[in-house]
Amino acid sequence: MKFKIFFFVLIVSHLNSQSLGDQLRQSLESKKTMKEIMVTVDSFYAVIPNDIRDNGGDGLMKYKHWKRWEWEKGKELGPNGEFVNSTEMVLRADAEENRKNKGMNRSQLSGSWTSIGIKESLYSPDTMSNSYANGVGRVDRIAFHPSNPSIFYVGTPYGGLWKTLNGGTTWQCLTDTIPSIGISGIVVDWATPNIIYILTGTGDNCCGDFVTTFEFNNPSSGVMKSTDGGVTWNATGTLPTTPNIGSYIGYDIAQNPVYPLELLVATSDGVFLTLNGGTSWTKVKDGNHFDVEYKPNDADIVYCTDNDSIFYSTTYGTTWLNSSVNIAIPSTNNRIALGVTNAKTGNVYALCGKATGTGNFQGIYKSTDSGLSFTRIVNTPNILGYVDNGQDNKDQGIYDLAIAISPIDTNIVTTAAINVWGSTNGGVGFSTRSKWHENIVSSTQYVHPDHHSLTYNKLTNRLYTTHDGGINYSDDNGTTWTNITKGLIVSQFYHLAQFKNTPFVFGGGLQDNGIKFRGLGSKNAVHIYGADGFSAAFQPNNPNIMYSTINGGWAKFNTVTGKTIPSSNPITQFFKHVITHPTDTTIVYTGSNPIYRSTNGASSWTNVGSNGLWCIAISPSNPRQLYAAGGPQLGAGTGSISRSSNGGSNWTTLNTGSNGFPAITNIRVTDIAIHPTDSLTLCVTVGGFTAGSKIYYSTDGGTNFTNISSNLPNIIVYSVVLSSSKIYIGTSLGVYSKLNGSTNWTSIRDNMPKTPVTDIFVDENTGTITCSTFGRGLWERKYCVNQIVLIDSLKGKLAYESIDSIRASTFVPGNNDIDSIFLQSGKIKLFPGFQAKQGTYLKANIGNCDNGPQPIVGRNDGQDKIVEKKGNSN
């Protein structure tokens, strides 16, 4: 405690000369690993005023944004705890998987994946007293077709690129065939609209130049290009970044308005130019740059920004000069967004993203001479904060910052940050155009907070904003708004809970969109609460009662009314899990450090020790058996796995490092799954990019483990579930499965997007798998269907299961003993045309779905291998 008081005094004594943001920057300059960074950050935020900790200010972002980053990147480190370019790693693994599986059949299970939302988020009946900031998922960028106003595209941080043909009535994802790479910029070629460029990565993940050094944002892998309207995608030439930089962040991409093959890209490692449509790129400017804009209708004049300077080029971006400003922009400014207009092409506006005090921000600067010089025209009220009158000192300038100038009237200036503000006198005076919270009494309309782009469609003069809840448009420069998010399925689920006794009822936590509840058979969800929803769990006998964690908080809800049920929060840690007893309605646990248990439905709690901050699981067959994993931090660091055999009263630490499980020093456990009928059989998954270290299996309660990673690619494994006979895992490339006791894993992604799978549920009663994803919402697959008819040629290791019958007149070519076909149903009929060539393993088993072993490739016991089979057979 004495250290904390002394540290705070030091901070206060320097407030006049050095911002808190500057102090933290200096403290982090020598830190290279996740552990070093977060020890510093946690100590720093522990002693600053709660208001700044919770809301940001004085050069600092909100503490929750740090914890968000820590949660994400802690699963994406290299073998020694180092930061790696996770985007490149996943793209590389995907390419290898495609080569390996070329020519194999699509189906690895019966049926196919179906998107089950969230299609639309509906308010709970108790909206006005409880829920707030309703939305579906985050959208970062937008671009328009050059001649058809009904066609435009939006980019998301984890859900890919989406297209609408009818102004937003319906949407289609164009990038489900490539990994979830994030979209930081979009260009629709004005000369050939079927050509589309996307800048990969997630530039708006927050929150400061020093943070990008440590991979706060999803890194970029350069620019991808489609020449067929988004059907197929290929990488353009490599951006020549600084040698040994490791990775970089993409922020913006722009196309020359006269020469369509010329494009510029702004990144954390400089500005890059192509003169040949992306075939090759040249670095034309060093440094971290956020925005790049061409002067309208001019081939040669371009503008760009870093955090505290504006630059212009009169040589189409090959050389750059500093623009002069009448009031200096301090180095502590976070970011600068640019606005240009066809109404007066020589005008340029620059919005500087930093609050400088209550009611003030750094300002909007205006140039009337094509960027040579800028004059600050306004710096009050604070249009970057939360309140309607601008009288606060908050901002998220590095995360949400945009400005748009009307293409027909240069006096109409609109800005966006947490809220939208507008001016009708050229930016001299502003008034609010949106509010971030539905329950705030205000004349302005609610639009989900945290706006990432603000853009006019020049064909219609319609203004669009993309934000953390989706997308809205306005036909009156922001006075009124229409939401067109419905059908844009981009929800980022941290975790999902299934109500066991009523199939297809789910609850879950979303980034920036709170807690959602999905009722029976609906693609829509009910919005229960705002902020960052994380974990959820149902009372075992009642789907109307759900426990949830939100940021550092805790809540108990009635899912029908949306009302909060009185409960207490045991610990204010971020990203804590919640699990409930499978039969006892009074017992609840938090996965936190330490673990807490309640025996009265969360009215009060007991500290039961151990560490479950990473994950916690309870046996469905023996609820006194629990397993937990955690470390001192959410990121990689020294952690542990523990087991309790008496409901959490006592814990035994499992001796990782000498029991077949790797020492938990530079890895993080991501999930634990327990067998449905055997409490001593479990699987534990680990994150990170250490090849061959993904999942571990134990049959003796974790005393000993076996590495069963086998042929899994070097990607992140986020989740795991055990059914009666199979293991399913969720990865950054979708779902894989394998039979208990077999060796190799098989991808069952099929038509599911290549996006992180955060939770998996297998309902053996209905033959259904349900997954939550971080970017593409919820997906479902009926793997046990009524009837299957096989007529096509089959190749690869395949499994087909049905309730009633399987009828096959197919050809199985055999291929060096790698074909393995498993048929399981109440009735199996082989009709004329059925052939299984030498080298094929075929097993036909009469039984229910998920019952009985599949053939194991490489075994030849005289029972499953057939040389050739033709004709009718029952």
Image (cartoon, rainbow, N blue to C red):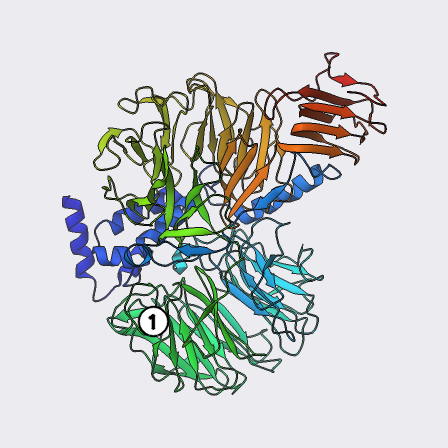
Give how far across and how far down residue 575 sits, in percent.
Answer: 35, 43
Residue at x-position 83% and y-position 22%: 872
868 to the left or right of 210: right
Instruction: Specify the amino acid type for callout 1.
Output: Pro
Q: Is residue 509 above or below residue 146?
A: above
Residue at x-position 25% and y-position 37%: 602
Observer able to see residue 683: yes
Q: How many marks?
A: 1
Judging depth in this view, the residue of 269 and 421 nearest the camera is: 421
Judging depth in this view, the residue of 476 and 858 nearest the camera is: 476
Observer able to see residue 328: no
Identify the residue position indicated by label 1 in the image. Answer: 330
Question: For the view shown, which residue lies furthest in the top direction?
Answer: 862
* Quadrant, the N terminus: top left
Helix, strand or loop at label 1? It is: loop
Q: Is residue 151 above or below residue 710?
A: below
* Quadrant, the C terminus: top right
Q: Is residue 839 above or below residue 130?
A: above
The part of the image, by quadrant, that contains residue 787 is: top right
Residue at x-position 54% and y-position 84%: 342
Judging depth in this view, the residue of 838 and 715 nearest the camera is: 838
Neighbourhood count class around disc 1 (C-alpha, 10 Å): few under 14, some 14–19, many 20 upward: few
Give how far across and how far down residue 290 sits, in percent.
Answer: 47, 66
Give how far across and how far down residue 593 sits, in percent.
Answer: 29, 35
Q: Is residue 454 above or below residue 377?
A: above
698 to the left or right of 425: right
Give how far across and how far down residue 404 sits, in percent.
Answer: 46, 76
